[in-house]
Every structure is written in structure tokens, then in C-alpha cells.
Image (tube, coloured by chain):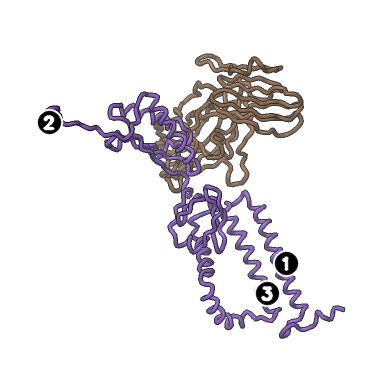
Chain colours: A brown, B purple
Amino acid sequence: MAKGIAGDVDTTQRISWSYKEGQQADKIPWGPHKLPVLLDLEDISIAVEKNNQSFLYRRYGAGENVEKIILANKGILTLNPVEPLHKPAEISNYLLIEFDQLVIVEPRSKQEVYLTFPLEVACLLEQSGVVGGHLIDIFSFCCSKLTLYGNVKNGLVCRYWKSLAYTALPAINPLEQGIMKLEIHNSLGRWTEVRRAVFSAFGMKLYYGTDMVSLDATMKINKELNAETNFNDKPLRKGMSKAVEQFAPRLIGLQGRMVMEEGY
Amino acid sequence: MLDWLDHIVYGRVTWLTLIVALLIFFAALLLSKLITIHLRRVLKDKISKENLEILSKISSYGILVFAIIWILPTIGMEPSGLMVAGGIVALAIGFASQSIIGNLISGLFLMGERPVKISDLVEISGILGYVEDIHIISTSIRTLDGNFVRIPNETVFTSSITNYTSDPVRRFEYKVGISYADDADKAMAIIKGLIKDHPLALVNPAPQVYVENLGDNSVDIMVRIWSTSTGWFAVKMELLWKIKMAIEAAGIEIPFPQRVVWFGEAENSEKP
């Protein structure tokens, strides 16, 4: 628990969550929490405390302190996993996942691998009976890093993430990382080596459960140095809820499709 | 009461036709403004800002030119006749307004070639700043210290232009000198660690950290880092101080310029 919060906050609801490796993880407190509330998530604490006729939102820990005043009499704080492209803000709309080992795909086949991706957590302020929440904060337990996909002249700046390619669901910290099922379609008549995949933030379909956040994606290898990635709007297993999208597709051409023209 | 409207002003042009011509001109002016506002509102999220500016300017100027060509016969000026008379007038005006025409043509070429775009950080004729607008005659720049500079397009067109934001990424570098007595490998490992931890220092193109020179006063370590073209300067400022602090915290000295002086033999010093 972060110092300076636990002792001096008058909260009616108090939830703690931490990951214990090798043990059955507790349920992640995704979803709505009535105000006032105190959430201790690993080394980050979130407190929304009553302050006269308003609320004070505070987030402490992991080297960041955030404070915001919420002018409202009542409200709901919703924790929601979001596309991992907000930190650093407004720099990139693309996520590049580099495979830790080279993946070789059989000619003219469909193969599945599981990858990890960084998670970002959004705090949304909602009101019962009112559709749509207001984003008040985003944080992550993963370090953010950027990279360039393509050449210096026309390349794309992408959020960088390195992941092992698993053949079964990996055991990971579910508040730090999500799991992506990637179906690779190799339409070429030869063995193909895949080192990385680039995804567009527009149309990322995140689903969350009490112990996992998931993405379901497809990568179609069409020709030499050219592949296309896309997201499927379905959870990795039944009973998962759909996360609120922050990069909702605005135009028909931005439905989460990404053409990788500089190799894969 | 309105008989005066039929009075001839010159040639066959009456006050009425003059007023109609003026009304058409102002209506065209209003229409061009409305269309510009409408285009900006409708296409704001659909095309880039600079393309939107060019499109709105073309539509605005196009409507005005069309209106003027339409008005000319009503005020007794035939465009065909103007072409003959215009030849002579154009010659005179051409001499008188060489620079304006030069700037205008340069402006058209700049809009076609587009070496700079609105909001780019550029250096033109030694002036460094953000492009605020590209007009048909001139380009306006807001310098980094907040001053407004208007540069004629002819100058922009004929000058060498450095555009710092045309590409998505750019590289910057430092030279870090450490003492000969210290471990360069250790210093390089510290610097690499700091670069790895910084979110805006790119993974690819990979940063380079290497001993570049055995200098007079120090072992010079070259540090080359790629970052985004919008965020590189913040990274440059932040990392340099972090590197200095981290290296010193590890007990590695960043030496001042120094010279080792050897005095002569002791026996010589005894001589008067």
C-alpha cells in the first residue's frame, strides 16, 4: 500500500490486489466501484475520497502522483483495461510486438501463438443511469518504450513490446500484461519466418475477466515482406466482458486493419 | 425616385450595374468565407491540416476569380479586350511588381512541392521556428522565442530549408568525456541503461554508445540516440543531465581540460 493514503482516507470500500507468482490469482477489481473508494493495486494506490461537496481523486505509487478534484455529489469509478497506447500520450497509434524467438510458420497453413502485451488501466468516472464514462486517468504497471517500424523517412513510430511466443496460455501478472491469441495465416508456398507483428490501436477489441485481459488477432502473410494484421471481436474464453474502447474506429478505413509493408 | 440608378456612370455602365457588380463581388466574398468555414468544419478530422488549408484557399480564391470574371462584362470590361490591353499593362505592372509576382509564383510552387507544412519546425534563411501559415505571397513562422516572422515566399523558395519534423524520427548525440583512469565499459553500460529506461529513446534505430576518441584530456564516449521528431529535444535535455549524474554517482570522473607538465632534471635546477 502506498504511504500517505491508507491512514487518512475515509473510505467505505477498500480493495487490495497483488499478484502472487505460481498461486491462483485473486479476482482483479475491474469494473465499477461506488465512491468513495480505496484501491491498492500492487504498488499503486487509487483513492477517491469525499471532500465536502466534491471528491478528490488521488493516485500514488510507481513514481507518479496524480490528484484531481471531481465536482460531483455521487459517482462511480470504473477500472477498465484500455489499448496500451496512451503512455506516452498521443505519440503512436500502433503497437509493435517483437517475438523473443523467431517463429517459423509452415507453408499454406494457419497456426496459433499466444503473445503477451502491456496493459494500461483507465479510471473512468461514471454515473448510474448515464451512458458513457469520462476518462480521468490512465496508468500502467509496464514501462513504456517506443520503436520505429520501417524506414526513417516513412516509418511508423510504434509502442514497443517484446514477448515470448507461447503455444499455450501463459501464466502472467494479469494486471501488468494481457494475452493475445494471434492466428498466423501463411498464404505463401514456403516456410516463413515471423519476428514481429504491428497492430493498429483503432479497433483493438479488449476483453477482460477476473484473471485475464485478452485480445484476439489475426496476421495474414500475403507476400514477401507484406502482412496484414487485424482484430477479431471475440474474447479468449466465455464470460469475459468487453472493455470500453478509447481508440474507437472513426472512419471506415480505420477498423483495426494494419498493413505491414516493411516486413514481419 | 430611383431614376438615378439608370444614370450612366461611364460607357454603358449605370449605377445599377455597378451596384449589382459590387453586390455580386461581396456575395462571392461571403460565399468564399462560408465555404472555407464549412470545409474546415466538415473536413477537420478527415484530412490533414495543411491539405485542408490548401483546399480552403483554392476554393476561396477560385470563387473570387470566378466572380471577378463574371463581373467584368457587367462593368464594361470584356475579358478578351483586357487580354490585349492587359498585355501592355501587365508589362508595366510586371516591371513594377516583379517581387510580388515572384513571391506569388514561388508560393504556388511551394504549395505544390510542399517542403514545409503548417506546424513543422523549420529553419529558413537562418530563422528557426514553427510554420504558422503558408500564404500565397509569404510564409509566416513563429520563432522558438515566440516572435512572428513573415518570410516572402521567394526567399523561402530560393533558400535552403531544414525541416526538423518532416520525418517521424530524428537522431541527436552527445560526446561524454571520462577520465583515463576510469572504466569506459562501466560508463557505457550506465549510459545504455539510462537510454533503455527512457520511453522516448527508440529501440529501433538502435542507440549507439562507443568510445569515439582518445582525446587530450579525456576518453570520449559518443552517444547517439534516436527519438521522435516531436519529442527529441525533451529527451536530449533530460538524458544529458541524467547521464552526468549517473556517471558521477558511479565514481567516474568527467575531467576538466588538463595538461601534465614535467619539470626539468633536478641537476639543471641547481644551476644559476
Q: Quadrant of residue A186?
A: top left
Q: Which residue is mark 2?
A: B271
Q: Which mark is residue B27?
A: 1
Q: Report x, y in % for residue A182.
A: 50, 33
Residue A154, relative to residue B34: is it above or below?
above
- How far is mark 2 from mark 1, CA to CA? 103 Å
Q: Report x, y in % for residue B75.
A: 70, 79
Marks 3, 1: nearer the viewer:
1
The crowding category of the residue bearing disc 2, from other C-alpha atoms within 10 Å (few below 14, some 14 to 19, many at least 20), is few
The crowding category of the residue bearing disc 1, from other C-alpha atoms within 10 Å (few below 14, some 14 to 19, many at least 20), is some
Kindly state the secondary structure of the residue where label 2 is placed. loop
The amino acid type of the residue labelled 2 equals: Lys
Kindly state the secondary structure of the residue where label 3 is placed. helix
Q: Are marks 2 and 1 in contact (CB under 8 Å)?
A: no
Q: Quadrant of residue B79?
A: bottom right
Can residue A84 be seen in this snapshot? yes
Q: Quadrant of residue A225?
A: top left
Q: Report x, y in % for residue A79.
A: 64, 26
Q: Tell me the residue at 65%/56% (across/down).
A: B39
Point out the residue furthest to the front here: B272
Residue placed most toward the observer, A213 or B92: B92
The crowding category of the residue bearing disc 3, from other C-alpha atoms within 10 Å (few below 14, some 14 to 19, many at least 20), is some
Q: Is residue B111 left or right of residue B266?
A: right
Residue placed most toward the observer, B95 or B31: B95
Q: Report x, y in % for residue A189.
A: 40, 41
Q: Which residue is mark 3?
A: B70
Of label 2 and label 1, which has the lower sequence position? 1
